[in-house]
Amino acid sequence: MIDPDISTEAARALLTVPIDPTDRLTLDRRRFLQMLGYGVGAGAMLGGLGEVLSPGALPGGLRDAWAGSPVAPTDGILVLIGQFGGSDGLNTVVPYTNGDYYAQHGALAIPPSHVLPLSGQVGLHPNLPFLKSLYDSGDVAVVQGVGYPNPDLSHFSSMANWMYGKATGSPNTGWIGRWLDGMGGTDLFKAASVGQGLPLHLVGDVARGIAIPQWGDRFAGGSDEHDRWMYDALRGFSATPAGRGPWHDTIATTMKNVIDVGQQIGPVFARDLPDGELTRQLTVVARLINADLGLRVIDTGFGGFDTHADQPAGLGGLLTDFDQALKSFFQTLDDRFRSRVTIMTYSEFGRTSWSNDSSGTDHGTVNNHFVIGKGVRGGLYGAQPSLAGLSRWDRMAHHVDFRSMYASVLDGWMGGGSSTVLGANYPNLGLFETSPGLDVATGGVPPTALGDFVGVTPYRLYDSRVAGGRTIELGPGAIAEVQVTGQGGVPASGITAVAVNVTAVDATQDTSFTVWGTGETRPDVANVVIPPNRAVPNLVIVKVGKGGRINVMNDLGAANCVVDVIGYFRTTTANRLQAVTPSRVLDTRDGSGGRRGPLGPGGSYDVMVRGRAGVPVNANSVVVNVTAVQPTSSSYLTVWPSREARPYASSLNFLQGVTIPNLVIAKIGANGRIAVFNKFGYVHVVMDVVGYFSPTSPGRYVPVAGTRVLDTRSDSKVAPASMVSISVLGIGGVPTSGVSAVALNVGAYQPTSDTFLTAWPNGLTRPLASNLNPARGQDVSNLVIVKVGAQGVVNLYNHTGSVHLAVDLVGYFTG
């Protein structure tokens, strides 16, 4: 008989399937793959299978178990977070206007002034600010008063009841396991627990999930040259039949597939994991979802909620961990899965309404739980349990059976079947307002085609800081998915590429953004090089991908992302580029362009561009490099067609005292001018024209996969007052002839002094213009559109100090 006072840890151990080396369904992934990779597979390739094992030793379904297919676009994904030990629901969702709560919880009660209000009666613990922000966005359902009839106060029995999920019978299977049984198939990658064992609720009669260690493993996940040699050699065994019979060939094929899966999961653990048990687990969970291996349910959890003593510090720290873990999860999760993921919390029971003599609470019956996600109908469900008349050892009555919460998630998010899984019908709480994946990109990737340019008034497509974006930063490796077609004047079809201004805001460390078409292979290109704690913009011309979308990936740390569209390229006749030798049309420092003196707060100025710097009267748009110089305040500039309403978009963001440029494609107003606006403080503005778009110009744009054409970081820096020459024809998909200009992403790294860089066509005199203005010690980048010079070469000049340069060729214009 099990001790009713069994600890939380012991109860979890008893309700977890131990890792058994002979049972592949209970293997964690490391041992499963190592058994195949170093045992069965290796022996089978060295000799006949009969020499190493009998046919009965090969587990059924092994050949197909590796083949995790991607999650369907409208399939829901469920993430479970266990709060083991029995969390104090009253101090998590606080009834801050209830006098009985303050009388019974005593010194443990959260003061009303500290509560994060959800309504006029309840609010969240003050250590849950991120969860509160999700609630305010409508993404959190708070299910109050959750429990079950005839509750048991034992950790083991209560945990078993929650994991089992049925009201009758013995807990020999779990509710998720039975859901897996109903799914059919033997795919291991449908459900997983991040940990060293498999909890009961992931065990079915036939199907089971797998356990994935939160630290990952190494087999088949290595990426260095020697690892690749080994994996290629092992793959070679399955390339053709070996003449040793079907079993031998099956094992060889299985080995190849195991390596493929290992390399699929390898990136999940390639980046460093953050500190904190739950934060680490949920970061792994988000990466597993991003890897799209077919996982529908992922289980996590953490303990410490059995707060019989010293609860204020203990529970406060646990809730801080929970809040930070949620933030890390959503920072890491790619946008393409945000509409497909729901999180649900669970705990074996709640705590007593009365505090004890050790500054703690004892085992209770009722709790409050959270269901979190973009598809959730946010709000309060159930009701706070009544505390009226409760004595020291009385327990609160529940309002919502926990199986009703399960049923609501199964039927509302996971495809139905709750009555079969749970053995009865339970009320659906109506927790969801949308089905999974309604905004998932569909359709194929448009083919690369020649593109004529159409300028639009700048329009904000995406801002991770506000509703409509992520409402949270991009974490390391996280991908924002941005809809561009059908938005801001961009047609819904017939588009080959778009010109967007991509701005990174408040990066936590040195990082970079990569931008590419959704559904295409991510290029090895840094489109925006980002120092910490700065707003850094860059113009990006990018091919449109699947569903008319583009991706933006952050490399390291966390950073907010803002995307403004300023034009698009289409196959039908419009405007084409004519590159020109850079020419200055505005410099407020010396009066060039008609204005002397900085732009003040809220100030604007119209710059004549038609008929100047080689721009003809029929030009539709102009390509200008805009530089903010000596700003007295952090601010932004907006460039737009003169005499049109100023849009809510930024062309250039800068910090106080930091000189920074950005390439801008601006539609020209009817009066032949473009306008520039400054938001805060005072700033000098410099504009250099580098090209224009008109119906009679020759250059149609062709986007190409990014190709690095220069990187001095493996050699010496570019010296002061020195230039480098770069061949751009016949490289990376660019033809050897018929090219008028190229689009280059230029990155400056480790500058030893404040300097500027100038790009211009080979064979011509270097112009008085700048494309990049690096500050000492700051890595920066900028898109450069430059006319191709003699011998198919463009030049790049560094003015002061020494600097490393990295240049990526991202597109070209026909001649």
Image: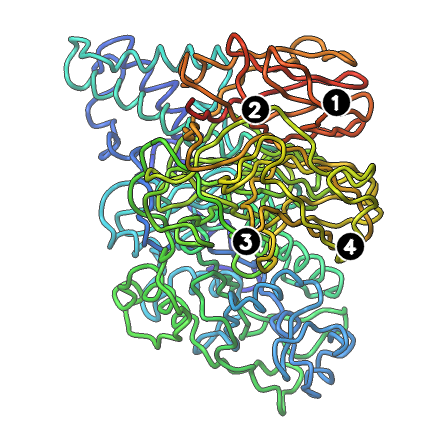
Separation of residues labelled 3 and 4 (CA atoms): 20 Å
Total count of labels: 4
Separation of residues labelled 3 and 1 (CA atoms): 32 Å
The label on residue 460 is 3
Separation of residues labelled 4 and 2 (CA atoms): 32 Å
The label on residue 750 is 1
- Between discs 2 and 3, the one toward the N terminus: 3
Separation of residues labelled 1 and 2 (CA atoms): 24 Å
**CB of mark 4 within 8 Å of CB of mark 2?**
no
Separation of residues labelled 1 and 4 (CA atoms): 29 Å
Mark 2: secondary structure = strand
**CB of mark 1 within 8 Å of CB of mark 4?**
no
Could you tell whether 723 is left or right of 720 in the image?
A: left
Q: Which amino acid does label 4 sit on?
A: Phe
Residue highlighted by disc 2? 786
The residue nearer to you, when weighing 758 against 334, is 758
Could you tell whether 775 is left or right of 382 in the image?
A: right
Q: Position of residue 571 (x, y in %)?
A: 33, 37
Q: Which amino acid does label 1 sit on?
A: Gln
Residue highlighted by disc 4? 680
